[in-house]
Structure formats: C-alpha cells, structure tokens
Image (cartoon, helix red, strand yellow):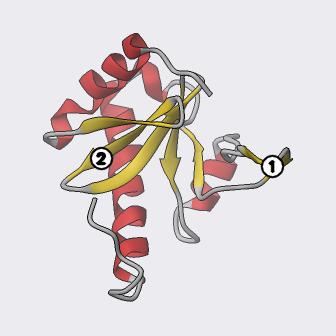
Amino acid sequence: MASSAEFRDHVLDLLAPLGPVTARRMFGGFGIYLDGVMFALIADDILYLKVDDRTRPDYEAAGSAPFRPRQKGKPFTMPYWEAPLGALEDGDELCVWARDALGAARRAKAGKSPADRRPA
C-alpha cells in the first residue's frame, strides 16, 4: 500500500481551494484531512474519497470502485471509493467530489456516540 510523496503533493495542490488540507502517513499511504476530519485517503497512489449512502450512487455511476484492503489475508470494503476518472486532471472537479466526501465524513462523525469519537 505504498504511496509516493509526489502523488500526495499533487493531491494536496488540487485540494488547496478547500482550505488547509493536510496529509498524515498511515499504513504506507496517507489520510487526507480538513479541519480534523479525514475525508480521503491515498493508497498505492490512488485517491479514495469517503462515501455514504447519500453519495455512493454518484461513484457507482462514475464507474469508481471501493477501497478494498486486506486484513489477515482477506479483503474487506471500507467506505472510501476511487476518485472518478478525470477528477485528478481537473482541480475544480476534484474539489466538488472532495466537498461531497467531506460532507459524508462529517455525517459519519456526527453519527458516532461521544465514546466512539477519537480526536483527529
């Protein structure tokens, strides 16, 4: 799941219009955050954006696929989907998708009980 600093920097440059977006190393990739909320991740130089029931149909319609890491040798699905093709070539388009991902991440965070919340 290794990811390059160059790809991370490219993504952060594209997302700069959203505000102070940051990246934190995690499991060979990066978590992407805004205002302490993780709304995207990078694994193997692929950008995945947070989805929920409200936004998942848009990703399906765009032909994206879910993030499927392996745990103990078995794949499982996480609520992150590949950024649609072309979005990494158009910063304005990527920011639209990222705003939706940030909304999904905030809704997920709001739905957790206080005991489940961890500081970001």
Q: Residues within 10 Å of mark 2 (few under 14, many from 20)?
A: many
The residue labelled by disc 1 is 72
Residue pictured at 49% horizontal, 46% vertical: 49
Q: Amino acid at mark 2?
A: Tyr
Q: Residues within 10 Å of mark 1 (few under 14, many from 20)?
A: few
In-front residue for pair 26/83:
26
Name the image quarter holding residue 103: bottom left
* Residue 1, percent from left and from top: 62, 28
Describe the element under mark 2 as helix, strand or loop. strand
* Residue 91, percent from left and from top: 32, 26
Describe the element under mark 1 as helix, strand or loop. loop
Give the answer, above or below, for where 26 lies relative to 89: below
Q: Earlier in the sequence, mark 1 or mark 2?
A: 2
Which-is-in-front pick, marks 1 and 2? 1
Q: Quadrant of the C terminus?
A: bottom left
The residue labelled by disc 2 is 33
Give the answer, above or below, for where 75 lies relative to 107: above
User: Marks 1/2: CA distance?
Assistant: 27 Å
Q: How many marks?
A: 2
* Residue 33, percent from left and from top: 29, 46
Residue pictured at 68% horizontal, 47% vertical: 66
